[in-house]
């Protein structure tokens, strides 16, 4: 499934990115054109399971290369109009560049060949750009509980207490933090950097306060 992001700048420039959410990572296409910050051993995530003897590059960095280089000089507060087209609907938002880039980076990284972020591929197929913290919590918990229901139906032990979800988001937080080190090294201004910083914040919000936030959402999801 293809999802298209179009960035329209006030100066008239337009940048289009098409993300195939079902793509398969192919390291055979690697060339010397890939930058130092995309190498697996550069700011490698401490929880990365990939071996440097088998992989020269970080899969998520390879997929994020064009985005990073396109916006490496952009300031995070610059206004852009972002149009996101999925097979079922189109979203349009006039916002600051870092918010648009956060959504695009999140989609690209979640559908990359990263063995940790790749667990987001189910959510990527129902991509919701510009999601709030509340929407992120509802989508993440809902998706996880569906997985547990299926595990239960298959005779496996379900995790109704969401212990695994907390652990997973702690891993995601670490991946985003380390990946930000790559993007910082590749950028001259702060749009890319702050986009990754807000991804770190989102993951932190889920992993650190999931129980509290679910309590806050009680009235939203339970009718009187």
Image (spheres, rainbow, N blue to C red):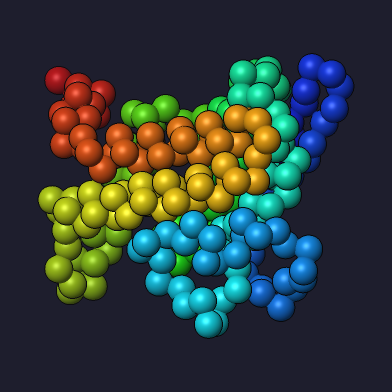
Q: Is residue 129 above or below residue 156?
A: above
- Say above or below: 156 vs 46: below
Q: Quadrant of residue 147?
A: bottom left
Q: Position of residue 59 (x, y in %)?
A: 58, 64
Quick one: 102 or 111, which is closer to the camera?
Answer: 102
Residue beneath the point at 41% across and 39% down: 200
Q: Quadrant of residue 11?
A: top right
Residue 53: x %, y % from top left: 53, 82
Residue 136 visible in this rendered orientation of the protein: no
Looking at the figure, which quarter contains the C terminus? Answer: top left
For this orientation, the residue located farthest to the right is 12
Rendered residue at 65%/60% (across/down): 36
Residue at the image point whose x is 60% and y is 46% from the top: 185
The reply, left or right, for residue 107 in relation to residue 86 is left
**Is residue 155 depicted above or below 166 in this figure?**
below
Taking depth in this image into account, of 153 and 17 the one nearest to the observer is 17
**Quarter where residue 159 is shown:** bottom left
Would you say 114 lies left or right of 158 here?
Answer: right
């Amino acid at each position: 499934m293809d999802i298209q992001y179009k960035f329209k700048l006030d100066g008239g420039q337009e940048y289009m990115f098409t993300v195939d959410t079902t793509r398969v990572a192919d390291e055979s296409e690697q060339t010397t054109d890939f930058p130092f910050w995309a190498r697996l051993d550069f700011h490698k995530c401490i929880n990365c399971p990939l071996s440097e003897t088998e992989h020269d590059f970080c899969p998520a960095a390879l997929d994020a290369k064009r985005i990073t280089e396109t916006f490496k000089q952009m300031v995070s507060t610059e206004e852009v109009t972002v149009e996101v087209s999925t097979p079922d609907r189109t979203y349009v938002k006039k916002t600051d560049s870092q918010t648009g880039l956060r959504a695009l980076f999140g989609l690209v990284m979640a559908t990359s060949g990263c063995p940790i972020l790749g667990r987001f591929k189910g959510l990527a197929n129902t991509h919701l750009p510009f999601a709030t913290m509340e929407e992120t919590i509802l989508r993440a918990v809902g998706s996880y509980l569906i997985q547990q229901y299926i595990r239960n139906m298959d005779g496996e032990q379900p995790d109704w207490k969401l212990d695994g979800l907390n652990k997973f988001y702690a891993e995601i937080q670490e991946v985003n933090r380390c990946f930000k080190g790559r993007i910082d090294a590749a950028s001259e201004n702060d749009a890319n950097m702050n986009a990754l910083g807000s991804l770190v914040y989102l993951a932190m919000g889920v992993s650190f306060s999931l129980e509290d936030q679910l309590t806050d959402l009680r009235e939203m999801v339970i009718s009187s």
